[in-house]
Amino acid sequence: MFKPLAALIAATTFAVPSLAKVDAGTPYLLQTLAEYGITIHYNPSDCNQGFAGRYSTNKIMTLCYTGQPTAFDHDTVRHETMHVLQHCAALRRGNTRGIVPLAINEDERNQWVSSVLRSGQITEIKETYPVRAHQIELEAFAAATHYSASDLTKLIKSWCIKSIPK
């Protein structure tokens, strides 16, 4: 039986993709996320549960890292940002309770994922996450590898709706 905590822990054990990089655009991406109403928690106490990051549909992104952020940490920001985009896509499509893949056509999405991720990475993701999360996670892992922080900033601005300041 799938255990959510086990998936979170396993997600942190993925090898850093060969294209993982420290991305100079990450600070601006994080600033843009905040401007669009995403609350970002850095290293909260539950980070010791073994996950590198997460995003929830209550617009909270959690990022866990130790010391100076590494290429893996920048990759995590891009991955979690893709989940933000998937949430924005769901909202634009009338789904107010979840996240959906950004790319609608499953065949095209799978072809793109296969061109970005190694087959071993795809297998590991599918073994880690429940079937209902495969498409969302595959797209997020591929996006973290394929897109720069600057690319994702542009996508946030085109897919998401800015929150009204309180």
Image (spheres, grey):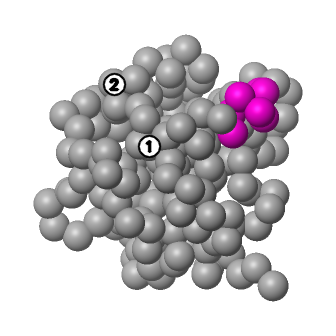
Residue 108 rendering spot, x and y as whole percentages? 71, 28
Q: In terms of secondary structure, where does tag 2 sit?
A: helix
Compared across the picture, whether 29 is left or right of 96 comes to left
Q: Identity of the amino acid at label 2? A: Ser
Is residue 28 among what the camera can see?
yes
Query: Which numbered marker is on residue 150?
Result: 2
The relative height of residue 142 versus residue 3 in the rendered view (above or below) is above
In percent of width and height, residue 164 lies at 56, 22
| Mark 1: secondary structure | helix
Q: Is residue 38 left or right of residue 89?
A: left
Q: Which of the 4 quarters of the picture holds residue 6?
A: bottom right
Q: Residue at x 23, y 70 (%)?
A: 66
Going 47% across and 81% down the picture, which residue do you hit? 49
Measured from the top left, where is residue 130 in percent x and y? 76, 67
| Residue at screen point 74% across, 56% down | 133
State yes or no: residue 15 in magenta: no
- Image height check: is 149 above or below 54? above
Magenta segment range? 104-110
Q: Farthest top residue?
A: 158
In this figure, which residue is indicated by the disc labeled 1? 144
Q: Position of residue 127 (x, y in %)?
A: 67, 71
Q: Neighbour class for label 1 at 10 Å: few (<14), some, many (≥20)? A: many
Query: In what quadrant of the picture does the N terminus appear?
Result: bottom right
- Mark 1 or mark 2: name the one nearer the start of the chain: 1
In the picture shown, does residue 7 fall above or below 120?
below
Front one among 38 and 49: 49
Residue 105 counted in the magenta span: yes
Tell me, yes or no, if residue 91 can be seen here: no
Type of amino acid at the residue the image marks with label 1: Ala
Comparing 141 with 74, the one in front is: 141
**Res. 22 image quadrant:** top left
